[in-house]
Protein backbone atom coordinates (compact mmCIF):
# COMPACT_ATOMS: atom_id res chain seq x y z
CA UNK A 1 0.00 0.00 0.00
CA UNK A 2 1.07 3.56 -0.69
CA UNK A 3 0.32 6.36 1.77
CA UNK A 4 0.03 10.13 1.75
CA UNK A 5 -0.79 12.75 4.37
CA UNK A 6 -1.84 16.40 4.39
CA UNK A 7 -2.06 18.58 7.51
CA UNK A 8 -4.46 21.42 6.75
CA UNK A 9 -4.44 24.42 9.07
CA UNK A 10 -7.99 25.46 9.94
CA UNK A 11 -9.91 26.77 12.93
CA UNK A 12 -12.77 24.36 12.08
CA UNK A 13 -11.25 20.89 11.70
CA UNK A 14 -14.14 19.03 13.34
CA UNK A 15 -16.69 20.76 11.14
CA UNK A 16 -14.85 19.84 7.94
CA UNK A 17 -14.19 16.30 9.15
CA UNK A 18 -17.92 15.83 9.75
CA UNK A 19 -18.89 17.39 6.43
CA UNK A 20 -16.49 15.19 4.46
CA UNK A 21 -17.59 11.97 6.14
CA UNK A 22 -21.32 12.75 5.95
CA UNK A 23 -21.02 13.74 2.28
CA UNK A 24 -19.38 10.47 1.27
CA UNK A 25 -21.49 8.33 3.63
CA UNK A 26 -24.41 8.68 1.20
CA UNK A 27 -22.62 6.41 -1.28
CA UNK A 28 -19.77 4.53 0.43
CA UNK A 29 -18.91 3.24 3.91
CA UNK A 30 -17.91 6.16 6.13
CA UNK A 31 -17.87 6.65 9.89
CA UNK A 32 -16.78 9.31 12.31
CA UNK A 33 -16.83 10.55 15.85
CA UNK A 34 -15.97 14.01 17.12
CA UNK A 35 -12.26 13.89 16.25
CA UNK A 36 -11.70 11.01 13.82
CA UNK A 37 -13.21 9.83 10.57
CA UNK A 38 -12.83 7.01 8.08
CA UNK A 39 -14.00 6.93 4.46
CA UNK A 40 -13.69 3.65 2.53
CA UNK A 41 -13.44 4.43 -1.17
CA UNK A 42 -13.46 1.57 -3.70
CA UNK A 43 -9.92 2.61 -4.67
CA UNK A 44 -8.48 3.44 -1.25
CA UNK A 45 -8.95 4.61 2.31
CA UNK A 46 -9.09 8.08 3.85
CA UNK A 47 -8.60 8.59 7.59
CA UNK A 48 -9.20 11.99 9.15
CA UNK A 49 -8.13 13.47 12.47
CA UNK A 50 -9.16 16.83 13.92
CA UNK A 51 -6.28 18.27 15.92
CA UNK A 52 -7.90 20.61 18.44
CA UNK A 53 -8.89 23.84 16.75
CA UNK A 54 -5.73 23.99 14.70
CA UNK A 55 -5.71 21.45 11.87
CA UNK A 56 -7.38 18.65 9.98
CA UNK A 57 -5.02 15.79 9.20
CA UNK A 58 -6.00 13.73 6.16
CA UNK A 59 -4.28 10.38 5.57
CA UNK A 60 -4.96 8.39 2.42
CA UNK A 61 -3.77 4.98 1.28
CA UNK A 62 -4.20 3.02 -1.93
CA UNK A 63 -2.71 0.05 -3.77
CA UNK A 64 -0.98 2.03 -6.51
CA UNK A 65 0.33 5.52 -7.25
CA UNK A 66 -2.37 6.40 -9.78
CA UNK A 67 -5.17 5.51 -7.39
CA UNK A 68 -3.42 7.34 -4.52
CA UNK A 69 -3.21 10.49 -6.63
CA UNK A 70 -6.89 10.10 -7.54
CA UNK A 71 -7.80 9.74 -3.85
CA UNK A 72 -5.76 12.82 -2.90
CA UNK A 73 -7.59 14.80 -5.57
CA UNK A 74 -11.08 13.66 -4.58
CA UNK A 75 -10.57 14.41 -0.89
CA UNK A 76 -8.83 17.76 -1.56
CA UNK A 77 -11.51 18.99 -4.00
CA UNK A 78 -14.29 18.21 -1.55
CA UNK A 79 -12.52 19.91 1.35
CA UNK A 80 -11.93 22.97 -0.87
CA UNK A 81 -15.66 23.12 -1.61
CA UNK A 82 -16.64 22.87 2.05
CA UNK A 83 -13.99 25.35 3.23
CA UNK A 84 -14.53 27.98 0.54
CA UNK A 85 -14.68 30.82 3.11
CA UNK A 86 -11.15 30.03 4.25
CA UNK A 87 -9.54 28.35 1.23
CA UNK A 88 -7.35 25.58 2.62
CA UNK A 89 -3.73 24.98 1.71
CA UNK A 90 -3.48 21.27 0.98
CA UNK A 91 -0.01 19.82 0.46
CA UNK A 92 0.21 16.04 0.28
CA UNK A 93 3.32 14.29 1.54
CA UNK A 94 3.98 10.69 0.51
CA UNK A 95 4.96 8.27 3.28
CA UNK A 96 6.64 4.88 3.18
CA UNK A 97 5.32 3.60 6.49
CA UNK A 98 1.84 2.08 6.97
CA UNK A 99 -1.02 4.12 8.39
CA UNK A 100 -2.01 2.95 11.85
Image (cartoon, rainbow, N blue to C red):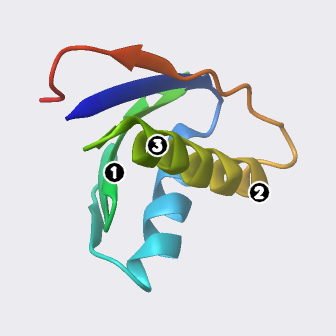
Q: Is residue 28 left or right of residue 72?
A: left
Instruction: Using the rendered view, name the quadrant where residue 10 is placed.
Output: top right
Split into 4 quadrants, where in the image is the C terminus?
Answer: top left
Residue 60 makes an appearance in the image? no
Query: How far from the left and from the top, in percent, is residue 54?
Result: 55, 21
Who comes first in sequence, dot 2 or dot 1?
A: 1
Instruction: Using the rendered view, name the quadrant where residue 64 is placed.
Output: top left
Given residues 70 and 28, the one toward you in this image is 70
Q: Residues within 10 Å of mark 2 (few under 14, many from 20)?
A: few
Given residues 7 and 96, the one toward you in this image is 96
Q: Is residue 99 left or right of residue 9?
A: left
Given residues 58 and 98, the one toward you in this image is 98
- Kindly state the secondary structure of the residue where label 3 is placed: helix
Residue that mark 2 sits on:
81
Task: Say which residue appears at 65% left-offset and 31% top-offset.
Answer: 11
Dot label at residue 34: 1
Dot label at residue 2: none
Query: How far from the left and from the top, in percent, is residue 31?
Result: 27, 65
Q: State which mark lies toward you, 2 or 1.
A: 2
Task: Say which residue appears at 83% left-offset and 37% top-offset.
Answer: 86
Residue that mark 3 sits on:
66
Task: Say which residue appears at 46% left-offset and 72% top-offset.
Answer: 24
Split into 4 quadrants, where in the image is the N terminus?
Answer: top left
Residue 68 makes an appearance in the image? yes
Q: Is 49 located above or below residue 93 in the figure?
A: below
- Kindly state the secondary structure of the residue where label 1 is placed: loop
Amino acid sequence: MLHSEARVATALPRRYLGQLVKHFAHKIPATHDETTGRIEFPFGLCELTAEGEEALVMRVSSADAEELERLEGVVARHLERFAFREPPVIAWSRADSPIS
